[in-house]
Amino acid sequence: MENEAGGKNIIIVAGEASGDMHGASLVKEMLKINPALRFYGIGGGKLKEAGVELIADAAEIAVVGLTEVLSKLVDFLRVIRNLRSKIDQIKPSLVILIDFPDFNLNIAARFAKKRKIKVFYYISPQVWAWRQGRINQIKKLVNRMAVVLPFEVDVYAAKGFIVDYVGHPLLDVVKTRFSARKEAKKYFGLEEKKTTIGLLPGSRTAEVKRLLPEMLKAAKMISERIPDAQYLLPLAETLAEKQIAQMISGCGIKVKIVTGATYDAIACCDLAIVASGTATLETGLLGVPMVIIYKVSLFSALIGSLVISVENIGLVNIIAGKTIVPELIQLEAKGERIAVEALAILQSERYTKIKNELAELREKMGSPGAAARAAQIACSMI
């Protein structure tokens, strides 16, 4: 169905902060190719800025683990109704899905399939980590898949599904405004010569509530060994600054909350404590050593232990094919253990080794231009 501008309508669904960012880049590239396209979808501020009319805010359904999904069931059902209604109303020529597999495969892709609408999946679910059987589901529901990690091509090929490798979109967006750390530290009001540690607790409220208290405990312990250490927390757009400030108050250390200029904030850190997810790769591309931590509910962890089939969960370690930086999961993600790992990096030759391995990782990931390549595929499907 054509819109009033004579172009086609597109639905795009991105369920969390990273998907919102990558989806926005894709939309911008598609509009360069065809300015008459009209986009509707589920996402956040970046998709909206890119020109997408939002059906629902991704923050309403951006959760981790089965127990978290149940707690937001009413929101999920409302968003599902709104999505189905919009698809029937505008009759899109293409549905674009960005990661977020449980919602996108089980709901969005099925809606499209029933209505014989083509589906383009940009940024594959992590089928190589868990539930490889989903590839069969993807083959049935998805017309074309664009993957962003080179080894994913072989994973899909082994199941008889040919996919397009476009490179990783973070290579286009992970850039700093300041050429020198000295300038960045001045901009954020940080002392130039003090050890700077970043706290990146994630973009979802549930994970922040689990991880930030342990990060703050670790920071307090690190300060006992490095008294002049300073801390900053780059705030995800999906989080409220007031809520984070309340969690920090009374913890015994000063943490500067940074809004905007996230990559500059990370780049001026000597080390970061990072929630597993896209932020680990962003931090790695900026060459900052890190400690990766993660924790979900006990029930979600038990289910995960049965289906996850990789040794590492951090993207930097997975792409490197080895453990570059430490990972502390579930019961290990405690303040004391985090502090021990952080100090072991900061106060040894291991720091330089990690810096060198992160530089090699960036080289391994290839060239920028993922969103432009994906946009060519998407527009060819319309």
Image (cartoon, grey):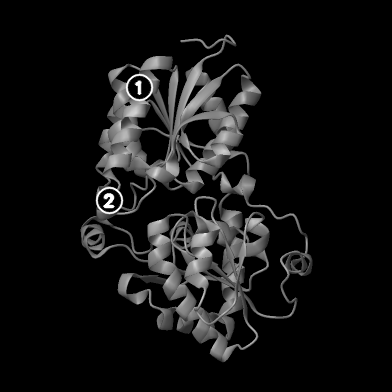
Expressed as whole percent of the image width and height from the top left, the position of residue 114 reads 28, 19
Q: In this rendering, does residue 158 appear at all? A: no
* Image position of 349 (left or right of 65): right
Label 1 close to label 2 by CB (< 8 Å)? no
Q: Choose between 181 and 75: the one closer to the eye.
A: 75
Q: Which labelled disc corresponds to residue 357?
A: none
Callout 2, which amino acid?
Ser
Residue at which label 1 appears: 85
* Image position of 294 (left or right of 290): left
Q: Give the alpha-carbon distance from disc 1 to disc 2, as whole Å.
A: 24 Å
At 63% from the left and 47% from the top, the residue drawn is: 173
In the picture shown, does residue 323 fall above or below 374?
A: below
Expressed as whole percent of the image width and height from the top left, the position of residue 72 reads 30, 47
Residue at which label 2 appears: 71
At 43% from the left and 61% from the top, the residue drawn is: 276
* Image position of 233 (left or right of 104): right
